[in-house]
Amino acid sequence: MRHQGGWIQRLLRSGSDHGGTLLGLVVAAGLLSLPALVFGADAAPAAATEYRDVPYVGSRNIVWVVAQLHLLLAGFVLGVPIFAWLCEIVGWKSGEKRYDKLAKEFTKLLTSAYATTALFGGILLFLLISFYPKLMNYLTDIFFPSFIVYCILFLVETATLYLYWYGWDAMQDGGKKTFHIFLGFMLNFFAFFIMIVPNSWATFQASPVVLAEGSDMARAWAATWNPTWWPVNIHRLIANVVLGGYICGAYAGIRYLSAKNTEERDHYDWMGYVGNFIGVFGLLALPFAGYWLMREVYQYNQQMGITLMGGFLSWLFILQAMLIGVLFLGSNYYFWLGITYRIPGSEMKYRKPMLAMLIVLLLCLGVWMTPHSLVASMEEARKMGGSHHPLLGVFGVMSAKMTVANLMILVTFMSFIMYWRAGKQETAGWAKVAKAIMGGVLASAAIAVIVLGVWGYFVPAIIRINLFSTSQVLIVLGVMLTITPLTALLLRSAKTTTEMVWGKMPPRAGYSLVLNAVMVVLLMTLMGYARSSSRVHWHVYGVLRDTSPYAFSPALGSAAAIMALCTFFFCMLVAFIFWVATMGDKAKAPSASSKSELPQGMPAMAGASSALDEPKAPKF
Amino acid sequence: MSEVVKLQLIGLSVVGCGILILLFIRASFVRVIGFVVIVLGLFTLVALSVPQMASLPPVEEKFDIATVKTPTDMATIGQKIFFSKGQCALCHTIGPSESARCPDLKGIGAKLSREFLFESLTQPQAYIYLDYRHEGVAKEYPAKMPYINKNPIGLSRNEILSVIAFLQQMSGEPISVTVAELDAPAAPTKAAQSGPVAVTQAY
């Protein structure tokens, strides 16, 4: 205990300026959770208790909110190091200090963000032990070896984070910088394992496997290696990158809206661009990981797949389509605003392509959101000849939805490439050939995706799922893997025709960044509900039945209210973390950043930086 | 006032508050909060506008052997199990369907013996039923038939016999399962409550 107390004291001291605030947060949250435990204790005697409840609020709702907040915060603290490390590498390779500064600015958040995440993890653990002792006993019996691994991972992660953060300024040059980059890699390496260990507990609940008799370690390992473990690991890894990018974008958007001077507007405009860039980068790959996960779910248990896609959760996927659609529209809209306001003269040049892309996106969204069967009165159903509309029913099936999802990814990718190339003149001799190839690849891919989609109506489901849908995904991935390096090569020798102008974006750009972040968080809460509800009345699917009064899955409307509440709380928590982390900066740095660190030209991350033309030459 | 209406009113109030903030507050951060609140309120309202379906845990079918007097009684119970606890209709159809993932069971009671049916339900991998509806080599169906007598479905022997009685009756065959074959009441009838002692889901 003495050792533990010392550790806590050191942790508090390390918090320096904000230690008191953090301590206050911990104490306040702990006090807030106490009444719930007391209620729970009153609800039933402790002996042989399987469940405890909280009157009026419900134990399940409390666990739901706390678990969701913990998960979102965990996504944030795992996404931010990836984001920061990528920025640091870009800054290291390009020599542009502002990337390093951005990376440091976000790494600073981690100390307070980790504390908050751990705090919610601790509260969640206490609540689970109190309210769901039967389930926790069962899971502990199987997984306790991995609990130990988890604790060890936390220790090394914390040590690495301290070295990474406190050593930032001391490790700026030569080999020290290389070592610092290595530390950043290790930080993400350990963070990845911190993510996948608890993933195994959650995925085991959804897709348990046969546990043969054997050692504790063997049983834990067998349970860990369940069919949905790796699909969820990859899906969450990419989703964390997306979350980190869009949260960065939202922060930049808010700071941009409240910027007091030109320097701040320039800086936060650029930061918003970087955040959106990384968010879209991950977003383009995310649907493929989601598709893999659903395939594994279907392969594991068809009933679970049908519950998700065709059962009571089928309407959830219409909501998901709406949120993803808004996210795609928001991300594209931000790209288009960037082309219009940051690259003078580009507005007229790209107006028609942008309009065409907007129409395609809206049409695709319309198809994606078309439900398979419509809510209709008896009379309406009789007129339609069933619950399927004669025309719209065609769009409600998987073949149509897979096609439009892939087309939306292609369009967003086109926006991304268009923005990357805007204001640049290719000078390479092979530029014309390369552009023709890229155009041909994009057009062929779009046609192939549509043809496969239409053809999918006329083949059995198994061929469509295993062959056609997979081919569509591979085609779109192939387009990205072909055009991205080709564009990078093409723009390496390109010259800047129009200098990028920062800080001229209208206020709606800031709001679109905030909207994108809210959509990502809502999507995470929505799909968390879907994953949990797919287990229906089982704690561990097919093995440990939920016999509590909360064995039902609530309807979408009331579930959405809790999702909205979780999203709001999370946004406020993140705002608090940013506020705490930047409080010291405002106090000690009243003057704006030096002129030499102002954004200049297009960032190297997009591969078309004016700084790449003349890396060290100041532009102002 | 129903729960949905209450939530709709709350959602509308939240959106209204957000609009008021945007109209009357100048502070950027508060305006962003107002914007977020509007988005979240609209999301909730949209979610409330789609069909509200909760997933209730299935009522565990009590197989009361005392009420079963004839094979027809067994078939009646079997039909209920087929469309509820047994979850057979999730994948199988009775009659041809374009979207069938698994074999059409129309007339299956006439095509297959009761022993084969019992084996198909309790040892589904013992004999793979192939799909010949394509040109070329026949293929396995994409869905693996689950073990019906194990979790998560976990039908008891009595319940499986009743389903077989239903399949035979539905196919116009005489029901070959007899009431005398049913287990005595003391026999376990709720395999789904086998508890957390072993993980049985095969993969």
Image (cartoon, coloured by chain):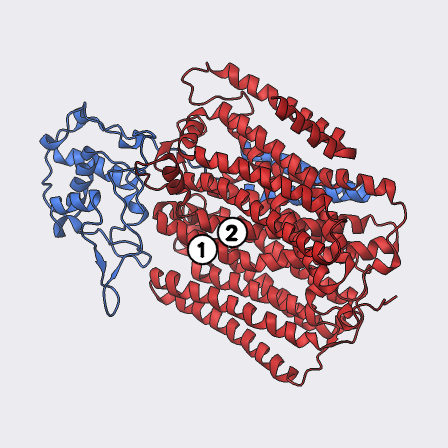
Chain colours: A red, B blue
Residue at 17% from the left image edge and 41% from the top image edge: B164
Both marks 1 and 2 on one chain: yes
The quarter of the image holding the N terminus of chain B is top right
* Closest to the observer, A378 or A577: A577
Please state the chain letter of the residue tagged with numbered disc 2 in the rendered image. Answer: A
Q: Residue furthest front?
A: A175
Q: Position of residue A407 (x, y in %)?
A: 54, 65
Q: Position of residue B19 (x, y in %)?
A: 74, 42
The picture places residue A41, in percent across and down from the top left corner, at: 52, 16
**Residue A541 shows in the view:** no
Tag 1 secondary structure: helix
Count the numbered circles shown: 2
Q: Secondary structure at mark 2?
A: helix
> In the image shown, does A618 or B97 lie closer to the viewer?
A618
Give the spatial CA distance, label 1 vs label 2: 9 Å
Which numbered marker is on residue B12?
Answer: none
Q: Are marks 1 and 2 in contact (CB under 8 Å)?
A: yes
Q: Residues within 10 Å of mark 1 (few under 14, many from 20)?
A: some
The residue that disc 2 covers is A235
Closest to the observer, B138 or B52: B138
Q: Which residue is mark 1?
A: A292
Of the residues under marks 1 and 2, which one precedes in the sequence?
2
The chain carrying label 1 is: A
> Residue at horizontal 21%, vertical 44%?
B121
Q: Look at 59% across and 61% down and name the residue there.
A: A362
Residue at the extreme right: A591
Question: Which amino acid does the dot numbered 1 rest on?
Answer: Trp
Q: Is residue A529 visible?
A: yes
Identified by mark 2, the residue type is His
Tell me where residue A404 appears, x and y as whole percent.
52, 63
